[in-house]
């Protein structure tokens, strides 16, 4: 029995003993090919062959377009990867730029020159004893202070206080590490910048184990927040990388003391900042001490004014000693609702000096009060409160 199989435009016959022979039809005999548009409509072989060739040619063209598209897509992908790697490389901090993190402590204030509240004076005494006598602490079952978290309103002198602490130890070195400046929109770049900076500090510390190295990390809250938002993965990966650097690199070296600083008001017991933002609790607990650096008190403001003007020739003696006028001004500025920081005081000094005309005229109490009046919005006081101030100072409003 003969059976016929249609394969493309060829036909194969199979005889009774299993041999097969492939032939190309050459006649115009009508054949019912199932591959036609209408399987029940007869089509001659020549028409069928032409149609199949046309379809094959169309298929090759489409295949060429497809491969060309894949080629273009591949080239674009390679170019994008190259550009991203090049971009990432350009965002990394060069070593010479990282070397600028070291500060010259000879230009910094001493603790004795600062107007510190009693709480910070007590803390500095305890801190020095801890760092200078680690063996005695160990014998008493304690450990030396290895890290501090300074928190409080902006402008209260956290950076100045940290440098003054470091200056208490001879030949100490001070590195300022701003984690926000090391960041990038690319997670890998942020982590490499952080590791590069920390590794450089550790290498310097390993060269001189007898010397104290202070690492000051400003705006540390940027890597301590628990992020559940759109950028959560980037932020949390950076937090984990910082934990490793803090614990495995900085924390393992006996001569490195890490000081973090944040302007956020923090509840250190709950680990919550203003606005309900949550800090990473394990990271917060890694700090040996949490120290509040608050807005200055009345006494601190008076001492700051006296210290600032101590060497100024064109300043009234009333602003250089504990005069009644200075005490009245200090009490006014120290009210919590005025949010007077040391940075605020600096701006008052500068504005007052610039407002005085005449080469020989001295800065007097009325000049300071006039500057305070110009900062009414910033200091948040009303006219009634200001009128009481000038009344207590026995200043005539016409003088202002």
Image (tube, rainbow, N blue to C red):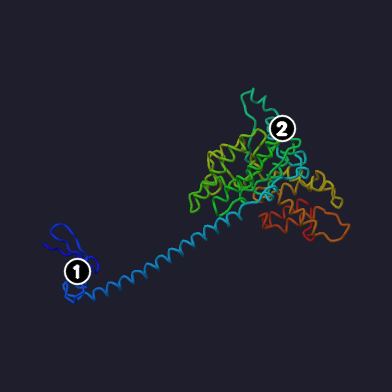
Image-quadrant location for residue 197:
top right
Nearer to us in this view, 228 or 185: 185
Q: Which residue is mark 2?
A: 210
Q: Position of residue 47 (x, y in %)?
A: 24, 76
Nearer to us in this view, 49 or 37: 49
For residue 348, above or below residue 159: below
The 10 Å Cα crowd at callout 1, few under 14, some 14 to 19, many 20 or more, is: few
Looking at this rendering, what residue extends furthest in the right direction? 360
Whole-Å distance between the Cαs marked 2 and 1? 93 Å
Task: Give the mark nearest the N terminus, 2 or 1.
Answer: 1
Q: Which residue is mark 1?
A: 34
For residue 388, above or below residue 61: above
In the rendering, which numbered label is found on residue 351? none
The image quadrant where one finds the C terminus is: bottom right
Image-quadrant location for residue 138:
top right
The 10 Å Cα crowd at callout 2, few under 14, some 14 to 19, many 20 or more, is: few
Q: Position of residue 234 (x, y in %)?
A: 52, 50
């Amino acid at each position: 029995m003969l059976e016929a199989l249609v394969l493309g435009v060829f036909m194969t016959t199979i005889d009774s003993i299993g041999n097969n022979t492939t032939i190309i039809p050459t006649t115009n005999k009508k054949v019912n090919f199932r591959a036609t548009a209408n399987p029940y409509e007869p089509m001659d072989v020549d028409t069928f062959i032409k149609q199949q060739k046309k379809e094959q040619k169309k298929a090759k063209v489409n295949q060429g377009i497809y491969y060309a598209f894949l080629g273009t897509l591949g080239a674009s992908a390679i170019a994008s990867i190259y550009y991203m790697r090049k971009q990432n490389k350009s965002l990394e901090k060069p070593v010479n730029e990282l070397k600028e993190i070291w500060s010259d402590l000879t230009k910094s204030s001493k603790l004795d020159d600062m107007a510190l509240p009693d709480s910070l004076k007590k803390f500095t005494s305890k801190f020095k004893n801890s760092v200078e006598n680690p063996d005695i602490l160990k014998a008493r079952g304690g450990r030396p202070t290895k890290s501090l978290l300074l928190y409080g309103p902006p402008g209260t002198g956290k950076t100045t206080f940290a440098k003054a602490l470091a200056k208490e130890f001879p030949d100490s070195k001070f590195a300022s590490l701003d984690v926000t400046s090391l960041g990038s929109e690319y997670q890998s770049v942020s982590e490499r910048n952080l590791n590069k900076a920390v590794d450089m500090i550790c290498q310097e510390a390993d060269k001189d184990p007898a010397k104290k190295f202070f690492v000051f990390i400003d705006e540390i809250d940027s890597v301590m927040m628990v992020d559940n938002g759109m950028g959560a993965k980037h932020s949390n990966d950076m937090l984990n990388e910082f934990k490793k650097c803090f614990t495995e690199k900085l924390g393992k070296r006996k001569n490195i003391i890490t000081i973090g600083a944040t302007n956020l008001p923090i509840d250190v017991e709950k680990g919550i900042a203003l606005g309900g933002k949550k800090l990473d609790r394990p990271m917060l607990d890694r700090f040996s001490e949490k120290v509040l650096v608050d807005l200055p008190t009345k006494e601190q403001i008076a001492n700051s004014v006296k210290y600032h003007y101590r060497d100024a020739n064109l300043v009234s003696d009333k602003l250089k000693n504990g005069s009644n006028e200075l005490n009245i001004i200090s009490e006014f500025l120290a009210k919590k609702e005025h949010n007077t920081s040391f940075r605020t005081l600096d701006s008052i000094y500068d504005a007052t000096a610039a407002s005085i005309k005449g080469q020989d005229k001295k800065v007097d109490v009325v000049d300071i009060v006039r500057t305070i009046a110009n900062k009414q919005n910033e200091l948040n006081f009303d006219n009634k409160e200001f009128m009481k101030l000038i009344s207590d100072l026995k200043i005539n409003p016409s003088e202002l």
